[in-house]
Each structure stands twice: as C-alpha cells, then as structure tokens.
Amino acid sequence: MECDKCGADAIHHAAYSGAHLCGEHLCRSVEKRVKRRVREDGLLDPDATPDEPDRWVIGLSGGKDSVVLTHVLDDVFGRDPRVEMLALTIHEGIEGYRDESLDACLELTADRSIRHEVVSYDDEFGVRMDDVVETDPEDMAPCAYCGVFRRDVLERYAGEFGADKLLTGHNLDDEAQTALMNFLEGDVNQVAKHFDASLGPFDERGETDAFVPRAKPLRDVPEKEVALYCHVRDLPVHMAECPHAAEAYRGEIQSLIHDLEENHPGTRHSIMAGYEELSALTAERYREGGSARAGSDDDRETRSLRECSRCGSKTSREVCRKCRLLDAIETAS
C-alpha cells in the first residue's frame, strides 16, 4: 500500500476519505486540520498584540490527545508574540498512573520551553482520587467525581492566569460520543449549551463572563490518527488508561460508533456535522427564548448562576457541586 501523496509506504488508510498516507503525510494532514479548526473557530483574537497577547491555557495530561494538541499549537504559535501559552497538568492522586504521565508532560514542556504548571487534588482539596474511589460516598463512577474536581481546577487556574481561552485535547471520537449521548438522553438544553461552551466559532457564541471560553482544536481528528501522530513524531506520551475509568454508558456509545464507522466510514464526521448545525440552532433559541426546551425549571436554574457561598465558584445553587462532594467525602472518611 503506497502513500497517495508521495508513493512511500503507507502506514494508514483513512476509510472515511479513501486516503492512504505515509507517516509524514499523515502528520501533515493532522496539522492541517488543527490549523483549519483554529482558523474557522477564530481561536486567535484578531485584536491580540505583543503588548496584549491572547492567553491560552492548555490542559496537558500526558495522554496522546493533549500531547499532540500542545505539540501542534507550540509549532504554530510558540514563537508568535501575540499568543501566550501555559500548559496545566492536574495530578489527581492515582498511584502508578499519574506520576508516569506527569513525566511525559515534563519532558514535552522542557523540550519545547513551554511554561508549565502542575497542581494536585491533594493540595487543592485535600483529597486523592484513590481514596475517593475507596469511600465513594455518593455511589458514583470515579469519573463523575474526577470530572467535577478537574473542571473546577481548570477553570480556577485559567482565571488566575488571566486566560482568554481554555483548550482541551478532545478528538473526533470523543466529540461524536458526547453528541450521540446528548441525542439519546434527549438533553436539548445540553446540546444548546455545548455550542456556546466549546463547539461554536467564538464570534457566533453567546457572550458570558461566567466561565473562561473553551475550544477543542483537535476535534476533527480521529483518535487512531492522534495515536499514529504520536508514534511518527516520537512524542513523549503515556498511553495507559486510567485504572479508575469506568464510564459504562460512554463505553457502550464508543463501541456503537466504532461498529458504525467500520461498516459505514464517515459516520463520526456525519454525526458531528449534523450535531454542530443542530447545536447552533438550539443555542440561538436558547439565547433568545431563555430555553431550548422553553420554560423548563432545569433551564431557569442553569441560567441563574451565582457564587458558591463556600468557595466563590459559579454555580446554580448556594453551594456548588464540588463543595457538596467534598463534604460527602469528608463525612465518609
């Protein structure tokens, strides 16, 4: 099998496009799609200057997605005086897992001279995920606890850095899974909020000062191609899966989409094309009428944000979800 671009040995067949690509042209293809997403989303503020740069925080876990995102963005913007980047790594307190991925983060950021900060749940909240999993006071999947804590840390440190954008390494598979889950759960409000939160171009999103705007520049690239990019570019990456990962429902959706993609190449792209259009329409209705599902109590609660009485983070209740979880963990300990 030969590369369609140069005739060298191909390492990948992208069934959704029919392309056969060698390692170098696969990497160029990935980089091209990330650059296009950056351009189409308007990631770089056109008013940014060396004196007032656009500040980006990149969530860097040491896994393949965040490593590729950091690598490509540094290639494109690392020497651009209009952009200031900070890589943020969160140590959840998972023995035998996070320390190894932290090594990958440290190697990447040192090699490329990227500013890098490391924070931990233990320092921030006085908890470690290994202990949370053992007590499990709310009878939830570990990812449910971790997701709440992670979002809080990312948001808070992005705010302290004065970040204009918060960037994460979600790939095409991740986004297609989320889209289908929202469809199947009938969560129209979540579809609408997804557009303004991270999916839509910045100049088309509803304005909000509540959270640092997010973007996912890797979301057009399939997971397999991200992994191949790491291999070809010989990037420092930790490939092991978190030992506490147990999102059963997402796993079912992942398997379903994988099977559909195998039999009908392009399924993931089709899901996202339709989802993006629907999310734009529902977001417009959500902003104009107050709800994608007009009059819902859940929507009114979501839009009435206030400061948590404990920590000051934005929440729809007097005490935020993070603080309530920490209370439950302390009580169970």
Image (cartoon, rainbow, N blue to C red):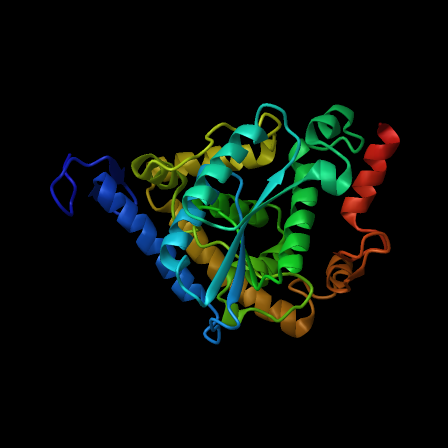
Which residue corresponds to the image point at 70% horizontal and 43% vertical from the top-left? Answer: 149
Q: Position of residue 192 (x, y in %)?
A: 59, 61
Picture residue at 41% right of the left edge, 54% below the top: 73
Name the side, left or right, on which 19 lies relative to 59. Answer: left
Of the 4 image quadrants, the one containing the N terminus is top left
Which quadrant of the rendered structure holds the C terminus?
top right
**Residue 102 spot, x, y in % from top left:** 54, 35
- Residue 32 located left or right of residue 52: left
Residue 39 found in image quarter: bottom left
Residue found 13% across the figure and 38% down from its top: 8
Residue 18 visible (yes or no) = no
Q: Is residue 20 left or right of residue 139?
A: left
Q: Between 38 and 153, which is closer to the camera in this rendering?
A: 153
Q: Residue 308, image x and y in percent?
A: 82, 56
x and y, in percent, of residue 257 in the image: 44, 39
Quarter occupied by residue 135: top right
Q: Is residue 205 placed above or below 133 in the rendered structure?
A: below
